DNA sequence: ACAAAAGTGTTCTATGTACACCCATGT
DNA sequence: ACATGGGTGTACATAGAACACTTTTGT
């Protein structure tokens, strides 16, 4: 792809060199990220940032920022944003959807390519916002009106989210829920994926699905889908917790 | 979303009015479409357009074009492109993926939001390219090297596709194949979805999956998944074809 | 002894797949 | 009568959900 120019005719090279793309109006492009985690209470959380500047000043938003044109791909922009916001590198990002209505941002036409990241809370170093803005984890909660977000006593309804981020987050949750049954997403949320118990994994599935799961059935599915296929390995060790039967430890491989 | 400005403080309005987004460099954004059809021989096809201009002049590409900034959403751009290229309106478009490497297009950084459309061949009026370019349906074929495209004796290997369109098409096929088992995509490819036989639907599934399916099992699945759920209705009529038992007709509801 | 998490077994049903077979039609 | 596609029935393996039950630990 890089060396397209090398195999060009003189005529085409001339065309390329004289081409001026600036005569057409262009949109801004951002890479935004829905970051999911599990908190201490095993509840599903997302990272939100309180906007310190116009527009939607004071509203909460998912992390993101403008792609650096000619310097990086949209994927790389997302990686960069994730790092800047959380200090995390080499976290697999999954492209969720692209939002492109002209009126999403009151300043200009912004096309946002949205990604999803699944991160264990322990790895997350939430950067205290540089510009007096605020970054926090919020539990994903449900009621009759749909979804809202909670951190302790502070609750954020959909209406207090900036731009169309309520729609974006809703889609991300929906997709996560659908994927959890056939993709190994849940492993990415484990504190330590090379040493975990079946029940730690079960709790992740439960809070993503927002309902409790049958222990026996979860184990059977675990053995079939993951152990049998080699995705997971039995470490032959046990987690000796207090007050209960020691639990077998497993390691995520692939 | 439209009336964000109405609820603004004077201060914010001032900010918005004085905001100049043109100080940042922006990428171009296109909406591209992978259009799938079934041909007379019940083979899966895609629509390709021979590029009449630089870059990749003479190469084959999927239809697409630049989004009109401030005038339309990316989705609307895709609809417009579909209409301009095929004369089709009100065809459901599914967003496939967004491609955003800086070197995809030798002219400039282009972010392409790619959509998939499933269209019965009868509805397709392929526009003879306005600028001496060429538009044709190509069968999706497989060999050891992966996928290639055929129209009669003319074959197009992946290498003769413009930009990264080979990757795009490959992803579109993969997604189509995955979706076919749990989404009602196949109905969109029927000549007449309000009057079709089970075997017409079966042939669509077969050519998407590229293998033959068991008749009895396909029927059972059809009755269970579609008839029982009301997605499909028995018309109580029969298709009286020549030389064989008349086949029951069904209607796709929704 | 008991709470609490860890782990096992059985049963029922739905689905996917393989395969053998019958049916209605025009030539 | 027969080729061709249309249509039916049986049988088996596996996945999912429901549920009753045992085991191991620290207190």
Image (spheres, coloured by chain):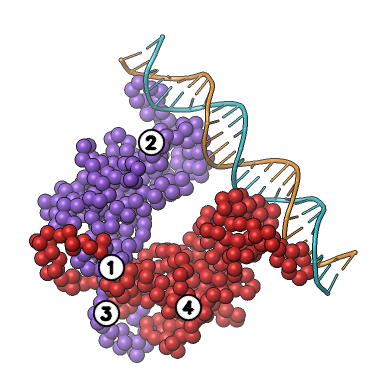
Chain colours: A purple, B red, C cyan, D orange
Contact between labelled residues 2 and 3, with CB atoms less than 8 Å apart: no
Q: Which residue is mark 2?
A: A203
Mark 3 packing: few (<14 Cα in 10 Å), some, or many (20+)? Answer: few
Q: Earlier in the sequence, mark 3 or mark 2?
A: 3
Q: Residue at x 12, y 61 (%)?
A: B12
The reply to the same-chain question for discs 1 and 3 is yes
Contact between labelled residues 3 and 1, with CB atoms less than 8 Å apart: no
The image shows residue B100 at horizontal and vertical percentages of 33, 67
Q: Which residue is mark 1?
A: A102
Q: Which residue is mark 3?
A: A24
The image shows residue A213 at horizontal and vertical percentages of 44, 35
Q: Residue at x 50, y 38 (%)?
A: A221
Q: Which residue is mark 4?
A: B86
**Secondary structure beneath disc 1?**
loop
The image shows residue A35 at horizontal and vertical percentages of 29, 49
Say which of B11 and A189 sits in front. Answer: B11
Q: Where A240 sits versus A2, above or below?
A: above
Foreground tag (3 vs 2)? 3
**Secondary structure beneath disc 4?**
helix
Mark 1 packing: few (<14 Cα in 10 Å), some, or many (20+)? Answer: many
Q: Check the residue under mark 1 and report the chain it is in.
A: A
Contact between labelled residues 2 and 1, with CB atoms less than 8 Å apart: no
**Secondary structure beneath disc 3?**
loop
């Amino acid at each position: 792809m890089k060396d397209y120019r090398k195999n060009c005719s003189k005529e085409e090279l001339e065309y390329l060199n004289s081409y001026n793309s600036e005569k057409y109006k262009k949109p801004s492009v951002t890479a935004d990220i829905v970051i999911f985690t599990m908190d201490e209470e095993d509840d599903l959380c997302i990272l939100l940032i309180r906007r310190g500047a116009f527009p939607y000043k004071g509203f909460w938003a998912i992390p993101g920022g403008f792609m650096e044109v000619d310097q990086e791909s949209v994927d790389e922009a997302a990686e960069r944003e994730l790092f800047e916001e959380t200090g995390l590198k080499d976290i697999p990002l999954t492209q969720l959807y692209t939002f492109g209505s002209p009126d999403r941002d009151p300043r200009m036409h912004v096309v946002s390519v949205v990604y999803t990241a699944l991160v264990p809370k322990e790895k997350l170093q939430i950067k205290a916002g540089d510009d007096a803005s605020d970054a926090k984890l919020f539990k994903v909660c449900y009621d009759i009106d749909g979804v809202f977000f909670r951190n302790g006593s502070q609750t954020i309804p959909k209406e207090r989210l900036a731009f169309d981020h309520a729609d974006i987050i809703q889609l991300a949750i929906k997709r996560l829920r659908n994927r959890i049954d056939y993709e190994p997403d849940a492993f990415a949320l484990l504190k330590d994926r090379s040493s975990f118990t079946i029940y730690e994994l079960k709790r992740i599935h439960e809070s993503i699905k927002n309902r409790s799961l049958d222990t026996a059935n979860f184990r059977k599915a675990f053995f079939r889908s993951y152990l049998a296929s080699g995705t997971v390995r039995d470490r032959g060790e046990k987690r000796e917790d207090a007050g209960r039967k020691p639990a077998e430890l497993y390691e995520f491989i692939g």
